[in-house]
């Protein structure tokens, strides 16, 4: 059996990953609306990845004989100032998620819950990549500044993801 505290944390994380998916899908919709189709594509794929993360936790909790408790998913915001504002928020959100994963890892270690520790290692690695991807886009957007041509080019590039 999985420790109760870990079961609670995993249930909370299923919700957090679902919320991440919802947030990125909302950002994708905003981009589509402004015909930034490349950014929309990138964010939509990101939303799908977050769903896959939620299901990874879901499957793990099932396998460990835990009880899945699905809570309401909060509504994400629907409006942003511009493209850089969106990606700054993606980066900040990923940093927040990293904090949650780290807190789960700390709990697994504390409880000597080795199975959860091994499962969480995948997410620790994944968060390094997620943060790197987001911060790279933020840095590129900062270089581009207000140049529409540069923004158009990046939109094309992210559309190839
Ligand atoms: Fe995630
Ligand atoms: Fe993520």
Image (spheres, rainbow, N blue to C red):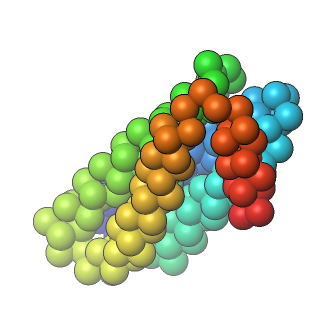
Residue pictured at 60% horizontal, 27% vertical: 146
Quarter holding residue 31:
top right
Tag count: 0
Residue pictured at 71% horizontal, 32% vertical: 148
Q: Position of residue 128 (x, y in %)?
A: 38, 64
Q: Position of residue 34 (x, y in %)?
A: 82, 28
Note whether residue 100 is visible.
Answer: no
Q: Is residue 72 left or right of 120 when viewed as pictured?
A: right
Q: Position of residue 41 (x, y in %)?
A: 77, 51
Q: Which quadrant would the C terminus be assigned to in this image?
A: bottom right
Residue pictured at 62% horizontal, 37% vertical: 23
| Frontmost residue, 91 versus 98 | 91
Q: Is residue 93 left or right of 154 when viewed as pictured?
A: left
Residue pictured at 25% horizontal, 74% vertical: 113
Note whether residue 110 is visible.
Answer: yes
Q: Position of residue 142 (x, y in %)?
A: 48, 37
| Frontmost residue, 139 versus 114 | 139
Q: Which quadrant would the N terminus be assigned to in this image?
A: bottom left
């Amino acid at each position: 059996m999985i420790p109760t505290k870990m079961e609670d944390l995993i249930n909370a994380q299923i919700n957090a990953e679902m919320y991440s998916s919802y947030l990125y899908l909302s950002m994708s919709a905003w981009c589509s609306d402004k015909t930034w189709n490349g950014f929309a594509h990138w964010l939509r794929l990101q939303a799908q990845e977050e769903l896959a993360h939620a299901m990874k936790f879901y499957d793990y909790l099932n396998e460990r004989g835990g009880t899945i408790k699905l809570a309401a998913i909060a509504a994400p915001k629907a409006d942003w100032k511009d493209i850089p504002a969106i990606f700054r928020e993606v980066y900040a959100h990923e940093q927040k998620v990293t904090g949650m994963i780290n807190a789960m890892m700390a709990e697994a270690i504390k409880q000597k819950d080795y199975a959860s520790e091994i499962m969480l290692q995948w997410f620790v690695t994944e968060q390094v990549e997620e943060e790197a991807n987001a911060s790279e886009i933020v840095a590129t957007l900062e270089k581009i500044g207000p140049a529409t041509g540069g923004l158009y080019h990046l939109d094309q590039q992210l559309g190839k993801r």
